[in-house]
Amino acid sequence: MSPAAAKDLLVALAREEGFDALGVAAPDSIPRAGARLRQWITEGAHGDMAWMAETTERRAAPAQLWPEVGSVLMLGLNYGPDEDPRAALADRTRGAISVYARGDDYHDLIKGKLKRIASRFVPRAGGPENVQVKVFVDTAPLMEKPLAEAAGLGWQGKHTNLVSRARGSWLLLGAIATTLALPPDAPERDHCGSCRACLDACPTQAFPAPYRIDARRCVSYLTIEHQGPIPRELRAGIGNRIYGCDDCLAACPWNKFAALGREARLAARAENRAPALAELARLDDPSFRTRFAKSPIKRTGRVRFLRNVLVAIGNSGEPELVPEAERLLADPHPLVRGAAVWALSRLLDGPALARLKAAHAGEQDDEVRREWRLGAGVPEAAEARS
């Protein structure tokens, strides 16, 4: 089978699996990506994501990950929502969950599709003795977005995510690497122009400049990847976003074309569109695991998820949520207790908070004790001397 015929077969199989954005990139098509990544790591903008630093060199080019690679087929799955996801920000008694996380875990969905494509492609393209393939979905050290740009699927916009003229900012990416040297597609060029809608939409100012993101300020990073307490100065900006953030994606003007080809979009669970914060605050570990079975949210774990929920409760301005936060002052995990203290410091007056602080004077965790002090209005300088 000729390289062109092999590419046509691979693309046809991918379309049968519902992928609506496809293109081939050569292994050497992203020569500048490694240097940009190293600079980003050097600046510390990756935050707690230590694996990014540990795999920097392997990410620099596909051949660093798999020396035998001849080409990479990049695939995009449209997940454009039915409505503007920012509508969920209006009711502060409910949580806003990123569109991609409202249904089943896309990693599992896309990997299953890629494996089916590979299992059908290899026998027809020459058999495993002549053709090898590897499939990747997000978790491997492969730079999907630069490769997708090189393959013509779109371009990395000013928010650093992929933007497509046909799908806007709503594409989930997968990759099939093969030992075959398939004909590459032309790269896409940047069409952002002077627009800065995505940059201006960020609630925590996570973009120090166009095409640069500081993960340490990004709501998606803070609510999903970050291990400890969310920095105090960023909590108010998080609002009621309890898992991820779609603001920069939703602001992209190219989304007006994302309605095309929606047949492959992810199915959202109704209970994840705008769940009540009070309901989520009552989840113990078993009910959390059941509630978010097969969901990407499950990987974050109950403790960090409740941290997020409590930040949202603190931002709600709703006294009716005080009992939910107060109950979690007795949670076994200090990360939850500390977030509960902060939430209550936002919802209660000084005397009420002082009474609660006295009732929990036996708190042993230093970070939770610090939250009590700061919540009571002890200045940072004085707190540092205490």
Image: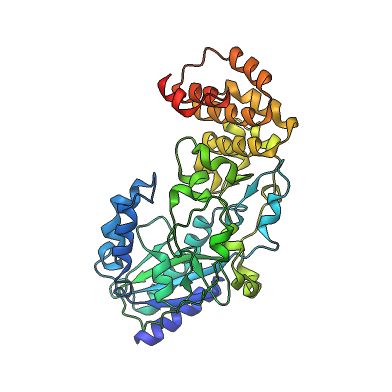
Which percent across, then down, holds residue 70? 29, 75
The residue nearer to you, when weighing 155 against 201, is 201
Residues 179 and 308: in front is 308
- Dividing the image into 4 quarters, which one contains the N terminus? bottom left
Q: In which quarter of the image is the C terminus?
A: top left
In this picture, residue 142 sits left or right of residue 242: left
| 80 up-or-down from 330: above or below | below
Tell me the residue at 53%/27% (across/down): 338
Q: In which quarter of the image is residue 169?
A: bottom right
Q: Residue 368 location in percent, x, y?
A: 50, 24
> Is residue 332 at all visible to an observer of this figure?
no
Above/below status of 23 relative to 93:
below
Residue toward you, 57 or 117: 57
Residue 324 showing in the rendered view: yes
Residue 4 quadrant: bottom left
Q: Is residue 65 left or right of residue 273?
A: left
The residue at the far right in this view is: 320
Q: Is residue 93 above or below residue 39?
A: above
